Amino acid sequence: MIVHVIRRAFSARTIGEVVVATDDERIARAAAEAGAEAVMTGAQPSGTDRVAAAILNRRGWEIAVNVQGDEPMLPGENIDVLVEGMRREPSVPIGTLCRPLPAERVDDPNAVKVIRDVESRALYFSRSVIPYPRSRKEAALLWRLHVGIYGYRREGLERFVSLGPSPLERAEGLEQLRALENRMPVLVLDAPQESWGVDTPEDLERVRRRFEERDRLGGKIGS
């Protein structure tokens, strides 16, 4: 799976370097074989803390993009949209992406939801459906599925990891709530293409079927 993620990262126009941050030697070996640099970080409380451990001591980067290792079909175009969107909004320390929420995943706690304000800043992330569908027709227009990717400016990354896990983060098991709870704006942009994260065995089977379909069509899906 990590090899597919690395290939997606390399396909982005805006990415200059691909680094895999891990505490597992097996992942590090697979990353190196796929052409990425592997950095051993030891145990970390969240993915963002792991990114910080890997790159905060490096110089010369403007925006770090955290592509989660369970997103084997994340298109490079989605990475580019996030980077370019953050470049247009230099005051925003953190950015991420979303997609329309499929109706069948409304009640799925593994499908993280997000709602935004009029400037595309996150209001809240949750494993529960938000907003509550008192009027289902109106709520459905606002439902968005969070895509597992983050962009960080150096100062945003430094502040985030200095705060430590927050009460909302611990309650929902969502690290991005640490930012909102501490008044750090999170830019939420629309992802131009679909992506399938792997959170459950069912997700894994779904992704395998998509790869099989891609192979039948000559590499036109998720390539």
Image (cartoon, grey):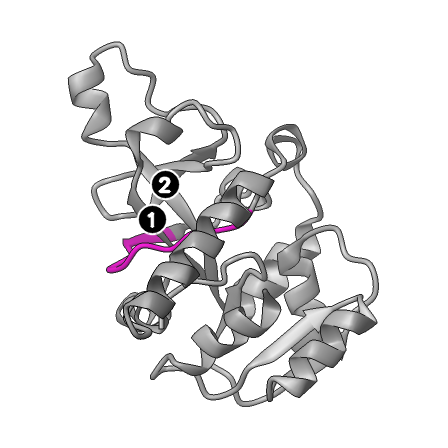
Rendered location of residue 31, percent (x, y): 66, 79
* Residue 68 visible in the displayed image: yes
Taking depth in this image into account, of 123 and 83 the one nearest to the observer is 83
Rendered location of residue 85, percent (x, y): 28, 66
The residue singled out by tag 1 in the image is 98
Q: Quadrant of residue 91?
A: bottom left
Rendered location of residue 158, percent (x, y): 62, 65
Residues marked 2 and 1 touching at CB (< 8 Å):
yes
On screen, residue 51 above or below 34: above
On screen, residue 29 above or below 131: below
Identify which residue is drawn at 49% across, 42% down: 180
Identify which residue is drawn at 39% across, 30% down: 105
Residue 49 among those drawn in magenta? no
Pick whichever of labels 2 and 1 is earlier in the sequence: 1
Query: How far apart are labels 2 and 1 at the CA level?
Result: 5 Å
Give the numbered dot on residue 145. 2
Identify which residue is drawn at 31% across, 36% down: 101
Could you tell me which quadrant the C terminus lies in? bottom left
Disc 1 element: strand
Disc 2 element: strand
Taking depth in this image into account, of 157 and 200 the one nearest to the observer is 200
Q: Give, as a single range, the part of the protein colored magenta.
A: 187-198
Could you tell me which quadrant the N terminus lies in? bottom right
- The residue type indicated by label 2 comes to Leu
Residue 190 among those drawn in magenta? yes
- Left or right, 64 with respect to 143, comes to right
Give the numbered dot on residue 70. none
- The residue type indicated by label 1 comes to Cys
Q: Quadrant of residue 195?
A: bottom left
**Which secondary structure type mostly characterizes the magenta part of the structure?**
loop
